[in-house]
Image: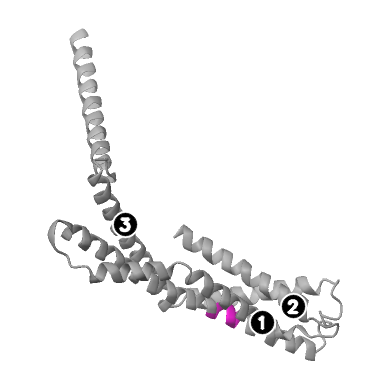
């Protein structure tokens, strides 16, 4: 999950970088910033697609190989464990893609709202043209307007039943994926005669129980000694 969020952040920053490069290359003194939403969304979507498809090719090839391999012989249980892992990973990636689409729609709707509000302000002459005065505070106002529109759109999406259900499904899929990953790792550690996480958890549980029993016996012994002394 941490790796996925890192890829999302990098893609988001790359989208801003592409938009800035395109704006710097094709900007004119009197150009209006009304194309801000369309250019930003296109750059952001292309960056998202590059980050999402970076490691999916190798994962898909490995999944196809495991799916075609027959679960026979001594490696039958090992192959079944890998199949469960790949099935959980496929489910998680599908839900993650749906959530990613929701976030892209949030950005698209927010930028569309920014464009609409900018048109309304320009028609009513509420604010001067930002492109005409690049050194003014209008870019800051544009950013604040974009943040405000994003919060409004995301607030509507975040309180919807579909978004809550998708978040819950993604969380459950992430837990199932982690459990499948742990099962594969533990099977590999057992092959090298190394302690696994479940074995260490059992040892920790036994040590905690022994400490509690020892504390109880020491308390009983101290009580017995105090009674004998009295």
Residue topped by disc 1: 39
Chain part drawn in magenta: 105-110
Q: Residues within 10 Å of mark 2 (few under 14, many from 20)?
A: some
Quadrant of the rendering where the C terminus is positioned? top left
Q: Residue at x 58, y 82 (%)?
A: 109
Q: Is residue 17 visible?
A: yes
Q: Quadrant of residue 199?
A: top left
Q: Residue at x 22, y 18 (%)?
A: 223
Specify few, some or many for label 1: CA neighbours under 10 Å numbering under 14, 14-19, or 20 or more.
Answer: some
Which color mode does the image show?
one colour
Q: Are marks 1 and 2 in contact (CB under 8 Å)?
A: yes
Residue 192 location (% of width, % of height):
25, 43
Residue at label 2? 23
Q: Is 214 one of the magenta-colored residues?
A: no
Camera-side residue of 154 and 180: 180
The vertical placement of 221 against 67, above or below, is above
Dot 3 or dot 2, earlier in sequence: 2
* Residue farthest toward the left in the current orientation of the protein: 73
User: Is 163 on the left or on the right of 62, as rendered?
Assistant: right
Residue 106 inside the magenta-drawn segment: yes
Element under label 1? helix
């Amino acid at each position: 999950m941490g790796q996925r969020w890192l890829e999302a952040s990098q893609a988001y920053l790359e989208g801003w970088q592409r938009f800035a490069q395109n704006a710097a290359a094709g900007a004119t003194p009197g150009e209006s910033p009304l194309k801000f939403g369309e250019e930003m969304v296109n750059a952001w979507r292309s960056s998202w697609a590059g980050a999402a498809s970076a490691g999916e090719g190798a994962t898909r090839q490995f999944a196809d190989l495991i799916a075609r391999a027959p679960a026979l012989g001594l490696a039958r249980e090992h192959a079944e464990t890998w199949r469960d892992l790949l099935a959980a990973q496929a489910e998680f990636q599908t839900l993650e893609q749906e959530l990613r689409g929701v976030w892209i729609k949030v950005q698209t709707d927010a930028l569309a709202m920014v464009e609409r509000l900018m048109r309304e302000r320009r028609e009513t002459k509420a604010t001067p043209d930002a492109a005409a005065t690049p050194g003014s505070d209008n870019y800051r106002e544009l950013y604040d307007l974009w943040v405000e529109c994003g919060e409004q759109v995301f607030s509507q999406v975040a309180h919807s039943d579909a978004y809550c259900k998708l978040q819950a499904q993604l969380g459950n899929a992430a837990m199932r994926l982690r459990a499948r990953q742990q099962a594969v790792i533990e099977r590999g550690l057992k092959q090298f005669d190394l302690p696994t996480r479940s074995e260490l958890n059992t040892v920790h549980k036994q040590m905690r129980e022994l400490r509690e029993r020892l504390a109880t016996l020491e308390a009983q012994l101290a009580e017995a000694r105090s009674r004998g002394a009295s």
